Amino acid sequence: MEVFQFLMPIFTEYGYLAVFVMLLICGFGIPVPEDVTLVTGGVIAGLGHADVHTMFAVGMAGVLIGDGLMFTLGRLYGQRISQMPGFRKVLTPERFASAQDAFHKYGKWVMFVARFLPGLRTPVFFSAGMSHRVSFATWFFMDGFAAIISVPIWVYLGYYGAQNWDWMFAVLRQFQHGIFALLALGLGWVGWRWWNKHKAAAAAAKDPH
């Protein structure tokens, strides 16, 4: 709620540009909730300060370009970026380890899941670029697939809830809980498949005949 109240006057004054810049900042791991940013963009559209369909397009551009910059920086500069003062707190060794572990367990689908996990999104996309094992096309498909689900939900929720903020925030919390529950189920299923595959491979290695 505090972030929403902080963003409202800025977005109302500067419109699409402010939303786009804030989403770029989110892509760099700054602790500003992306969902609240998109909802706030939808609210100013609902209040008549912007067009909601244009806001959706701006939201898609902001999240994809922000994530793409982290992927590209990882591809071009690797670990050197994590040593720079502005990135040390975001690209910590612990977050890198979590990202690498997630890649090992879930493969490319971790880039889809990362869109919904702000604390992991930046190191995951940075690690994907740094590894040189993920093509730009693969990253774009997985991140774009997740964004085409999340961005319209938040923007249009803000648009339709612009006149009733209590209802809007109640639905926002429900969506967040629902998304986390679905992600937990999905990760559990993928992890179960990975464990079974790993177990079968270990058994085959012990008994090649």
Image: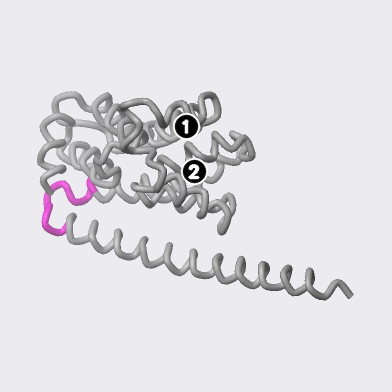
Instruction: Please check the rendered image and state whether residue 159 is part of the magenta-colored stretch, yes or no.
Output: yes
Residue 159 vertical position relative to residue 183 in the rendered view, above or below: above
Q: Is residue 53 visible?
A: no
Q: Quadrant of the C terminus?
A: bottom right
Q: Tag on residue 143?
A: 2
Residue drawn at x 11%, y 37% as measured from the top left: 6
* Kind of residue indicated by mark 1: Gly
Magenta span main SS? helix
Q: Tag on residue 68?
A: 1
Q: Are marks 1 and 2 in contact (CB under 8 Å)?
A: yes
Q: Is residue 42 left or right of residue 120?
A: left
Magenta stretch, residue numbers: 158-167
Residue drawn at x 54%, y 46% as measured from the top left: 142
Residue drawn at x 51%, y 54% as measured from the top left: 101
Among the two numbered marks 1 and 2 on one chain, the one whose residue lies closer to the N terminus: 1
Circle 1 crowding by C-alpha within 10 Å: few under 14, some 14–19, many from 20: many
Q: Which x, y percent locates residue 93?
A: 41, 43
